[in-house]
Image: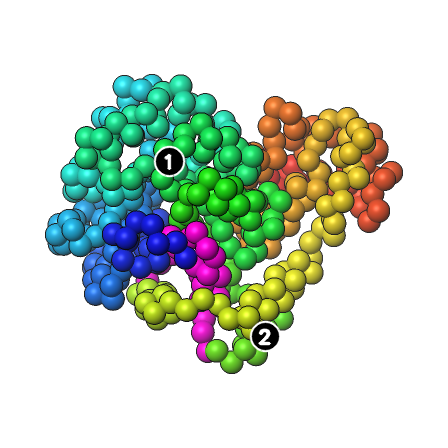
Amino acid sequence: MDNNFPEIKTFFGFGCMRLPMIGSEVDIEQFKDMVDYFIDNGFNYFDTAHGYIDGKSEKAIKVAISDRYPREKFLLTNKLSDSYFHKEEDIRPFFQSQLDACGVEYFDFYLMHAQNARNFEQYKECRAYETAFKLKEEGKIKHVGLSFHDSAEVLDKILTTYPDVEIVQIQFNYLDYEDPSVQSRKCYEVCRKHNKPMIVMEPVKGGSLVKLPEAAQKVFDETGSGLSNASYAIRFAASQEGIRVVLSGMSDMAQMKDNVSYMKDFKPLSEEEMGAIAKVTAIYKGLDMIPCTACHYCVEQNHCPMNIMIPEMFACLNTRKIFNDWNQRMYYHNVLVKDEHAAASACIECGGCEAVCPQHLEIRSLLKEVAKELE
């Protein structure tokens, strides 16, 4: 765990993307109760973005937090999303609208949102990072960071280009740790290389690591800890060095109380618990998934003339099928399909890949499935 940013009282944060709802509206009264419980138990970090719940997250924060608590009682993170600016002159008015919506005069953390190779060029051209650093000088931002959805190589490029970035938010959980499309471990290692503390998003993979397959559930049950499935996932992230905040998108008071129960007096995972997580991960990998071993024979030595990232696409589809994870479409387009790499639908069915596949996979048919599901 990282000790940077001492103003963050604990290592646990409230992600405000999946708030309690009544129909299409935020359940403000339950949200107030959750905020009170969160703060009463010594936590103070809240995370939002303008697009969360169609703008309703920011407004709910004003009603439930900013209007009810002194500013020094809470830390608030917001983000600059690429869809809300098209030139440098757009950024400051948008930023001010976020301050107004949240009912605050400054943000403790302001992140360049969902950075990837494509939109990073927009941020550079519009001097978004430079504008954020200037807003920091003016006292309207305390710390400038970024949230990230792309390859470790791209993250390294961004942090090299903007070394004054103070913190990085990455997707990180025990199933994505070695996933070749999400690259959690590799992104984590880039942050460590640049000495950047990290905020973890999706530690429970959008809730997917709560309801487990029967065999995986049995593994956790046999530990006898009595802890929830979410506790293993959240504590896995929080147990890594360099992690400063682990976010949880809690959508009801029961989730809040469960999370607080093991994060208030946080204890890293034991060796036995890490072993259980390894077993659960192996069980997931043994499910009805494409049995690709990622040997890369299919794409080496020009066996794929279209330069399609076949193993990585199969890993992406596996995750999509198991968890119905919407993020996989983003990773498919951001990481796997770029100028130098073709989409699955670009396959010309030459068969070169299948001729060298040690697993004898019907790659051409599987690529059609990838295209149908992820394009």
Labels 2 and 1 touching (C-beta < 8 A)? no
Mark 1 is surrounded, within 10 Å at the Cα level, by few (under 14), some (14 to 19) or many (20 or more) other residues, namely many
Q: Which mark, residue 165?
A: 1
What is the quadrant of residue 10 in the picture? bottom left
What is the quadrant of residue 259 in the picture? bottom left
Residue 207 pos. (x, y %): 46, 58
Read off the residue under disc 2.
218
Furthest toward the bottom, the residue is: 224
The quadrant of the image that shows the C terminus is top right
Answer whether residue 150 is magenta in the image: no
Viewer-side residue, 335 vs 271: 271
Residue 266 pos. (x, y %): 38, 67
Q: Residue at x 68, y 44 (%)?
A: 314
Q: Label 2 is placed on what type of residue?
A: Lys
| Above or below for 344 versus 219 | above
Q: Which residues are magenta?
A: 226-252
Residue 141 appears in the figure: yes
Distance from label 2 to label 1 (Cα)? 43 Å
Q: Residue at x 79, y 39 (%)?
A: 297
| Count of marks placed on residues | 2
Q: Residue at x 83, y 34 (%)?
A: 351
What is the quadrant of residue 280 in the picture? bottom right
Q: Label 1 is placed on what type of residue?
A: Val
